[in-house]
Amino acid sequence: MSSARGSEPVTHVQVGFAGLGAMGRGMARNLHKAGMLRAVWNRTRARADELAAELGVAAATSPAALARECDVIVLCVAADADVLAVVDALLAGLRAGALVIDCSTVSADTAREAAHRLAAKGGEFLDAPVSGGVEGARDGTLAIMAGGTESAFARAQPVLQAMGRTVTHFGPSGYGQAAKATNQILCAGVIQAVAEAMAFAKSQGLPLPQLIETLGKGAGSSWYFVNRAPNVVRDAFPAGFRVRLHEKDLKICRDMAAQFGVELPVVEATLAQYRELIAQGHGDEDISVLFRLKDALFAAAAAQSSGNSPGTA
Ligand code: NA7
């Protein structure tokens, strides 16, 4: 047990990593840099083999084989059912007292269920979803929101510190996911505002690069405005944070709010618009592609009033 913030790499923790997608690969590389990565596993075997060869670590042939090798296992897979499936597969090889840290974004209920299944086999679980995107995963600067027991959080410290810059324990199992869901609502509101503001600015004929430069320093600015409004100028919306993934997360937020009998307007509006974007083939683009729908409002209005006064001063 070590509180490793800013200290030397901790080499005695032997970590296994499962889920080498866009996020997981960067996170696993940072664990390797910190001297902790022992083995990796990925559903599509080739990805595990490739990273294992790059880093000189073992490629486990199954989650159970990974669990047999390591005391700490980090997961970064996709949705609720995927996390539970991998947790179940780990159980067959679980070492006594092993700690599973799940960095996927799933519901708080799934986190509690995973904690329950692990506890029944003598393991510990920490939900530890992350924010900061692929860049944060690569640079080890993720914000990590943890839920679980104090002891699980303390044990996880060196591992979390190797992957993130801001690591916060919010409470028992599920609280990390609740914090992450809060973040995803925030992202929805901000991207709505960025997309709408940029479509409005375009309609006004404003010079967009100068506008981004100036408003980026103003009170309405945000990370999304500074980093993603330029996509509008480039007319390209590469991921980024894919529409499909944010849709998954907002459905989690919707379900969690529904448990209180509440429908959240920003969540509902964004989900409806994401459905439209996905139908139009934009599901794998960055969420700033929402601009296209807002821009289309002006195009539709212009088309409707065509023949009137197109160059209204
Ligand atoms: P990616 O790039 O889509 O990667 C997803 C990873 O999860 C990838 O390694 C998948 O394996 C793996 N995966 C997905 N479903 C399963 C199941 N059922 N069993 C085992 N492995 C699975 O997503 P990101 O890296 O951007 O995001 C990962 C999580 O962090 C997600 O919850 C985000 O919301 C936040 P594959 O290579 O496809 O076989």
Image: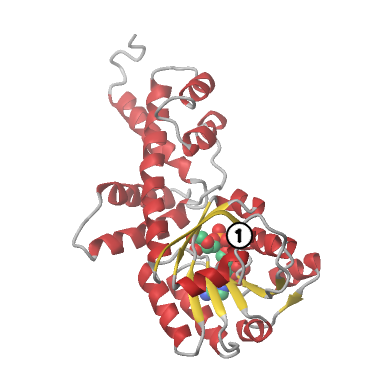
Q: Is residue 213 above or below residue 78?
A: above
Give the residue at mark 1.
161
Displayed-image quarter of ligand 1: bottom right
Q: Is residue 145 above or below residue 311?
A: below
User: Where's residue 108, x and y in %?
Assistant: 37, 68
- Could you say whether the residue bearing mark 1 is in a helix, strand or loop? helix
Residue in the foreground of this view, choosing between 277 and 239: 239
- Which of the 4 image quadrants contains residue 156? bottom right
Residue in the foreground of this view, choosing between 298 and 114: 114
Quadrant where the N terminus sits is bottom right
User: Where's residue 263, x and y in %?
Assistant: 22, 55
Q: Is residue 188 above or below residue 106?
A: above
Is the distance from the Cβ of mark 1 to the nearest ligand 1 atom less than 8 Å?
no
Residue in the foreground of this view, choosing between 270 and 83: 83
Quadrant where the C terminus sits is top left
Residue 279 in the figure: left or right of residue 71 = left
Q: What count of labels does the image hold?
A: 1
Q: Residue furthest top?
A: 313
| Mark 1 burial class by Cα count in 10 Å: few <14, some 14-19, many 20+ | many
Which residue is at a point 54% across and 76% down the rendered structure image? 100
Which residue is at a point 35% across and 28% down the rendered structure image? 298
User: Where's residue 87, x and y in %?
Assistant: 51, 80
Which residue is at a point 65% across and 75% down the rendered structure image? 16
Residue 227 in the figure: left or right of residue 203 = right
User: Where's residue 178, x and y in %?
Assistant: 37, 61
Applied colour scheme: secondary structure
Q: Is residue 198 above or below residue 170?
A: above
Residue 102 visible in the snapshot: yes
